[in-house]
Image (tube, rainbow, N blue to C red):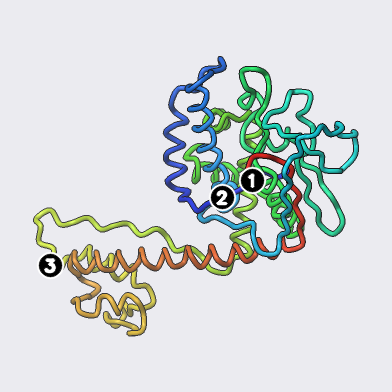
Amino acid sequence: MAHTHDKERDDVSEVASSDAASANAASEPSNRMSGPDRRARLEQQKRRNRRINVIRTVLLMAVAFAVGCAVSFFVLPRASVPAPVPGTKSLVSLPGRTTVSQEELDTPIGTYTHKGNETVVTVREAIEEGMSLEAARNADGTYDIPSADAVLSIARNHFLLADAQERGITVSDEEVSAYAKEVWKTDDLAVIAASYSMSKDQAANLMKESATIKKLRDQVVANKLPAEPKEPSAPEDGKNDDPRPEYGEYVVGLAGDEWDKAANKWAREDGPYHAELKNYTISNDGATYSAAMAAYNVAKTQRAAAEQQISTEWTNYVNKILSDVTVQLGTLVA
């Protein structure tokens, strides 16, 4: 089953760099902690899970599980309820509880329905949305009931991956490896699995699903993200207003079709680079550091605008995919 969820906007490059560093640190001890130490461990795991959510679904920007998707929340009753009948698809609440035993891991805590087809999400599946069962097990052998986000995540990625399959989108081992190196700075399954308290199989699934969704997004989103601009180095002599060839090459390179290299002048005067740089002396042969920094700031602004456009377009696409989905949740944890 597909796995992903996202609660809030985050920066994937920041996530990847911070988690790559943590992956090189010593892994958590295998013995179970209690009291303040255990609470600290759980809070750390929650932060890691939020990072996974961002990486899995959107890579660069968050996607809302929003417009048109009907979601029903149930307050769990205090009275006892019968155990789920094997093979049934009815939502069974866990009465007034926040933990389950190992024997109750296959209890349903949610369903999602599309075109009359209902799929059950169990406690086990929702836990494994973010970590391994071993990592989730409490000192007394119980498991905390997952939050509603885990059920929403599973539903969301199920339909995104199904859409990718319908479009014939697949990813090769080389593409998965390249994607992992881009996001996690490594394609070592053991390192990624240890970083997120997952099994190697979970990490492998995470990498493949993430790469597939990225490929889907790249196919359906018309706007493309420009390359991250590299900030020019300041002159060592501190003379920021002296024209230099390297700064001329830098500015002309960023200006793109706004600059006519053959004529050595602006090709048009209706673009953002001309608007910012019209009062600077620019040529193929040179520009000042100040002009280069002005061009750099334009490039950053353009990239930020493109990110927002892509985010909006992708969110609208996801909401369209999910517009006919109904999700029912039975959990005390928001």
Residue 228 in the image: state x and y as whole percent.
39, 58
Residue placed under numbered mark 3 in the picture: 241
Q: Which mark is residue 149?
A: 1
Can you tell which quarter of the image residue 129 is in?
A: top right
Secondary structure of the residue carrying numbered label 2: loop
Mark 2 or mark 3, which is nearer to you? 2
Residue 36 in the image: state x and y as whole percent.
48, 23
In which quadrant will I find the C terminus?
top right
| CB contact under 8 Å: marks 2 and 1 | yes
Residue visible at 65% across and 50% down? 212
Can you tell which quarter of the image residue 274 is in?
A: bottom left
Residue placed under numbered mark 2 in the picture: 7
In this rendering, the answer to whether 311 lies above or below 263 is: above
Can you tell which quarter of the image residue 267 is in?
A: bottom left
Tag 1: residue type? Answer: Asp
Secondary structure of the residue carrying numbered label 1: helix
Q: Distance between the residues labelled 2 and 1?
A: 8 Å
Tag 3: residue type? Answer: Asp
Residue visible at 9% across and 61% down? 239
The numbered mark, 1 or 3, whose residue comes first in the sequence reads 1
Mark 3 crowdedness (10 Å alpha carbons): few <14, some 14-19, many ≥20: few
In this rendering, the answer to whether 189 lies above or below 175 is: above
In which quadrant will I find the N terminus?
top right
Question: Which one is nearer the viewer's eye here, 69 or 187?
Answer: 69
The numbered mark, 2 or 3, whose residue comes first in the sequence reads 2
Q: Which mark is residue 232?
A: none
- Return the residue found at the far top: 31
Does residue 176 appear left or right of residue 326 in this picture? Answer: left
Residue 318 in the image: state x and y as whole percent.
65, 61
Residue 40 in the image: state x and y as whole percent.
48, 27
| CB contact under 8 Å: marks 2 and 3 | no
